[in-house]
Amino acid sequence: MPEDESFIHHLLSQMTLEEKIGQLNLESPDLAFDPEMIRQGKVGALLNASGALTGQVTGQQGSVETVNHFQRLAQESRLKIPLLIGRDVIHGYRTIFPIPLAQAAAFDPAMSQAAAAVAAREATVEGIKWTFAPMLDIARDPRWGRIAEGNGEDPLLGSRLAEALVRGFQGKDMARPDKLVACAKHYVGYGAAEGGRDYESGEIAEPTLRDVYLPPFESAVRAGVGTVMSAFIDLNGVPATANRRLLTEVLRGEWGFEGFVVSDWESVAELIYHGVAGDRAHAAALALHAGVDMDMVSRAYLDTLAESVRQGRVPVAKIDEAVRRILRIKQRAGLFENPLTDPSRPARDLLTPSARQLARAFACQSMVLLKNEGDLLPLQGFRRILVAGPFVHARSELFGTWSPDGHAEDVTPLDEALRQVAPKGVSLRFAEYNDLALHLTHEADVVILLMGEHPIRSGENSNVSDLRLPPGQEEFIAAVAALGKPVVLVIFAGRPLAITRPVSQVQAVLYAWHPGIEGGAALGEVLFGLAAPGGRLPVTFPRATGQVPIYYNHKNSGRPLGRDGAFLTRYNDLISAPLFPFGYGLTYTTFAYASLRLSSDVLHDRLEVSAEVTNTGPRPGREVVQLYVRDLVGSLTRPVRELKDFQAVELQPGETRRVTFVLRPEQLAFTRADGTRGVEPGRFHVWIGPDSQRGLQGEFEYPFR
Ligand code: NOJ
């Protein structure tokens, strides 16, 4: 990336203190905001500048004219510093892809990268140059609605996807007109909000923070992410927006992050509510000192920093440092050369056939087949099919949370999409969930139930205390199932739901998440066997809400199930195992694992671990082969399993392939009680398998050196 720090240096030397502070100020035109502020040099960046709102609001359209209007005002300011225009482009812009949690289920970083590239191309058409994505929060609690926006519970999968998404959004050169600046959020620990209540405080022990929550952010930094957003959370007693150790020492000192940090919405002024700042000036000084360069909409920087500098409470060098970082990203984004967006930029970039095709393939790849008794799916030989449930006519409901730029009219309604895909000779009938559905069940050969949660039930500030299906749905499923016809249960959701009872009552269960703009067609293709469900669970599925938190990489405890004795870790009223483990997912063929091989029983610099995987079923298929490790004895207790790598293989019926992984010592390192990180000598178990509970097991040693 061509870089000219002398340009930034020169610009900075011309700036007044007020102009510098203006660069640190992020405004949102949907709040009370006078555009004149831009001309006065009081605004560094805008979000929702296109005029469209975000959050849970859908169908708000932006326009390139509005964005260019604001950029022109910036060109009329004394130093003509362009604005950075931000927006929440989370899982697509006009072409809405499956929600991030669904994307994670595909275990396919290349596909995630391609989808992010489409989102960047589309968003930049309308003048957006900065997205508040990817969200990299590890989530172990599905009550928390924002689990929908992240990559699930695993640090390795989260890290691989972090890298892929940053590359997809930014490309090699984020100055290109079809690329934008990414923002790794919410740094850090936001997913650990107590009780699953968004914005709540949380506590994470240092080794867990280091080994579970931080790795995806470190990967994003390694991939060159331009910005990082500080989280709302009060973590271990220090609000993330005031955490100097994490924002400065770790992010910049240890990882070498060169971009800038933006606060989350008003999180600078919220330091007052947290009780670590007495007033806005105090809050601004704390956040700036911690390493937050840009204040998202609280105006605490704008209103107080100049006075704090004059009073000697904030050194101007601190402000210079933040301005430099912001200007550097504006420069890397090419904004000084090209502040305006070409309004005639061809409409061919929005909602192209190939983007739709990718959205459809991604939706198929992300759907997880959880149960398929008697190979009921794909549906074959059924003539009369009843499709029932609250999602039968779904359109924008398929988008999921954070899809402000998706248009309902771009979506083929689910019933119509199924009609288009269904084989000739099949009669499809539709009913929402009511008595009519029960009545029609009698006349059907098979019933497809489209159940689950509306997107408004997940995402920001949309938490639930009960992980079962929304009220009434379990009863409806039970009533249909009781009529004795084969039932395929399709669940649309933004989180793992506790579907224990319904799973036991139906023959097949397909978890479709919120599958995006092509969700209907994708579902049809999967149900009728034109495509296979490709997803594996990126998060553990609990049997009941009371099991939460439940995650696969937990510690063993002194009294694990399976050892002798009666006083073991468990509930009186529930078995301990999850309903479905991390990594789990069926498809339309089956796979067998055999012949685990280790290149040595001692790991020096590298160890090859391999196994034969055979497609033992009737159809071609894709298997996500997973490599897990357990460190048997450590100076701190170690997880019972940790995912260390995965590879997807496509196999024809009867085909066998040996899948080989390479393990290196650094993959076994962990953070110890004294804060140091390293591998400890001793014995390790290793598995190659289809999920976090099964697999072929081997053993090796990491020797004393
Ligand atoms: C608050 C959310 O926490 C964050 O994820 C989002 O990017 C900002 N609002 C801007 O909309």
Image (cartoon, helix red, strand yellow):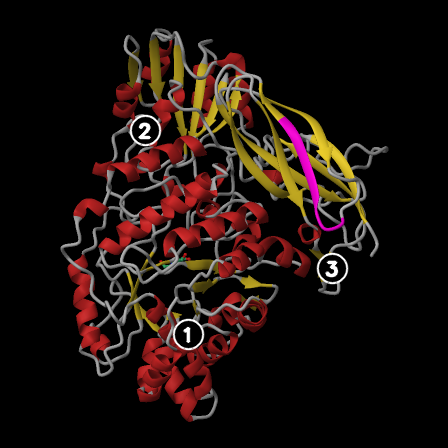
Q: Amino acid at mark 3?
A: Arg
Q: Residue furthest left?
A: 344
Asked which secondary structure carries label 1, the reply is: helix
Image coordinates of residue 493 in percent, x first then y, are 43, 36
Q: Within 10 angstroms of label 3, few (less than 14), some, or many (20 or more) residues?
A: many
Queried on whether the Cβ of the residue with tag 3 lies below 8 angstroms from ligand 1, the answer reads no
Q: Mark 2 or mark 3: which comes first in sequence? A: 2
Q: CA distance from mark 3 to mark 1?
A: 33 Å
| Start-end of magenta stretch | 604-612
Q: Amino acid at mark 2?
A: Gly
Label at residue 287: none
Which mark is nearer the camera, 3 or 1?
1
Residue of label 1: 325
Is any part of residue 676 visible from this angle?
Answer: yes
Q: In the image, is residue 590 above or below residue 129?
A: above
Q: Mark 3 or mark 1: which comes first in sequence? A: 1
Indicate the quadrant containing the N terminus: top left, top right, bottom left or bottom right.
Answer: bottom left
Image coordinates of residue 553 in percent, x first then y, are 66, 43
Residue of label 2: 520
Residue of label 3: 672
Asked which secondary structure carries label 2, the reply is: helix
As rendered, which of 287 and 698 lies closer to the eye?
Answer: 698
